[in-house]
Structures are given as C-alpha cells and as structure tokens.
Image: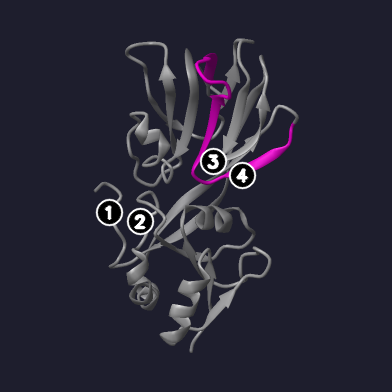
C-alpha cells in the first residue's frame, strides 16, 4: 500500500485511488490531511492546501494550467509517477489589509467595484516606485499560477513559475491601458476616488470593502511545491 496520499476536493477520486491500491488519507471537516503527498482536485482545493500548514508535494488535478494539473481520468497513473516528478515552486501571497490583518492568496487578489456601471481610480506602487494610476472597474494582481485565469481574460500575459505578478486593470477607462509584470513582494494597491464601493477578493473569496485612501500591501509568504509528471498539461496550450 505504501505511504498514504492525502486527497482534498473529491471523495469519489479518493475512492478510485483506493480501489487502484493507493493508500489514501482524507482530511476531516475540511482539514488538509497531514501527508507528505497531497492530491488536490480543483482550483479551490489547491488554494486550500496552499494556505494550510505543512509542506506537502501537491499533485494538482483538474485545477487549470497555472499549476500544470493532470486530467482527472489520469490521476491514478499520475500518483504512480510521483516518485519521479519534477517539482515546481509557487509562492503564497500575504495580503495585508488596511486594519493590519493578513490573508493568504494563491491565485490572485482583486479590487473591483461592487456596483454595476461604476468605476473607481486605483494606484499601483512598489517599495521602490509608483507604477501607475488609472480609472477602471478594478484591478487584478495575479501570481504566475493565477496568470492564466482572470488576469489573462483581461489581456494579461501568462507567466512561468516565479515570484512575479501580473497586474492588469479591469475594464479600464483608457483605450490603451498598461499591464505590468512586477516582483510581487512589496506591491500595493490603493483607492484614489470616493465614488464607488470597492470589494477586495482574495482567491475569488469576497474579503471586505476597501475605502477611499485605503490600501492593501502584498508580500511573499511560504512556497508550495507542485508535482509535474508525464500526465501534467502544458501551461501555455
């Protein structure tokens, strides 16, 4: 049977792996199993494992291109190949709120107006420079893992694994908006106009409202190790 493999996000797949002779450990009450290797099924499961304590080797299944996931129907073969897997490393972001509390993000951080047909104004800055100021519906700051997601749908590029981020305005007022690829550590985003309610989303979870003249700051947290096996899909196709 070997060392147990944790499974998060799909009890049916856990049963398939067990039927194939894989020792499986499931978390209870949504907890991540204390296993050296964890199969994470879907984007939410990958983010859950990334935010949890520990340093397992994560096999993403049906979780998008950013983490080179494997199709669900190849998961048994992929688990069998974990011993020979190549490892990619992805950062977890610490997002510091205006009140000093900290949340964690794996895919992206988004500021967006909550009201239809309303725009706001945003400033993006680093520890060394002011990057840009623009009027838009919002702005998304995506990790390399998150870059093929919403950031790409608003014309941001797809990044290879790194500690850089894609910063992309959402429905900007300008006809030729800038997009930036920047070191993620020390980035900040602030609200410059008191015209609309702005929501903060962390990995697509609504966190809170961010008010006029308030800002969020992003820093690097821990890293997540993901497995790349023969069944892993390309990030760029």
- Tell me the residue that label 1 is attached to: 234
Q: On the image, which quarter does residue 78 sit in?
A: bottom left
- Name the image quarter holding residue 152: top left
Mark seen at residue 204: 3
Contact (Cβ within 8 Å) of mark 3 with mark 2: no
Q: Earlier in the sequence, mark 2 or mark 1?
A: 2
**For the residues marked 1 and 3, what is the alpha-carbon distance in whole angstroms?**
23 Å
On the image, numbered disc 2 is attached to which residue? 68
Badge 2 marks a residue whose secondary structure is loop
3D distance between C-alphas at marks 2 and 1: 6 Å
* Tag 2 and tag 1, C-beta contact below 8 Å: yes
Q: Which residues are magenta?
A: 100-124
Badge 1 density bin: few <14, some 14–19, many ≥20, Cα 10 Å: some
The answer to whether the residues at label 4 and label 1 have Cβ atoms under 8 Å apart is: no
Give SS at disc 1.
Answer: loop
Look at the numbered disc 4 and give the secondary structure of its residue. strand
Q: Indicate yes or no whether the magenta region holds residue 122.
A: yes
N-term mark: 4 or 1: 4
Give the spatial CA distance, label 2 vs label 4: 21 Å
């Amino acid at each position: 049977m070997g060392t147990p493999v944790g499974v998060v996000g799909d009890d049916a797949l856990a049963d398939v792996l067990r039927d194939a002779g894989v020792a499986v450990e499931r978390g209870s009450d949504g907890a991540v199993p204390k296993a050296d290797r964890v199969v994470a099924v879907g984007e939410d499961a990958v983010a859950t494992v990334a935010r949890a304590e520990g340093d397992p080797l994560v096999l993403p299944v049906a979780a998008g291109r950013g983490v080179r996931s494997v199709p669900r129907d190849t998961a048994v073969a992929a688990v069998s190949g974990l011993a020979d897997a190549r490892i990619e490393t992805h950062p977890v972001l610490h997002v510091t709120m205006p009140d000093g509390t900290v949340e964690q993000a794996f895919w992206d951080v988004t500021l967006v107006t909550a009201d239809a047909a309303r725009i706001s104004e945003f400033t993006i800055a680093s520890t060394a420079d002011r990057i840009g100021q623009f009027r838009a519906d919002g702005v998304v700051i995506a990790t390399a893992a998150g870059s093929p997601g919403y950031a790409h749908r608003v014309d941001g590029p797809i990044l290879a694994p790194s500690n850089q981020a894609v910063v992309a305005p959402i429905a900007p007022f300008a006809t030729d908006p800038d997009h930036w690829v920047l070191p993620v550590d020390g980035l900040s985003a602030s609200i410059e106009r008191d015209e609309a309610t702005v929501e903060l989303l962390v990995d697509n979870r609504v966190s809170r409202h961010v008010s006029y003249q308030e800002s969020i700051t992003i820093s690097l947290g821990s890293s997540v190790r993901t497995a790349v096996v023969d069944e892993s899909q390309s990030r760029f196709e």
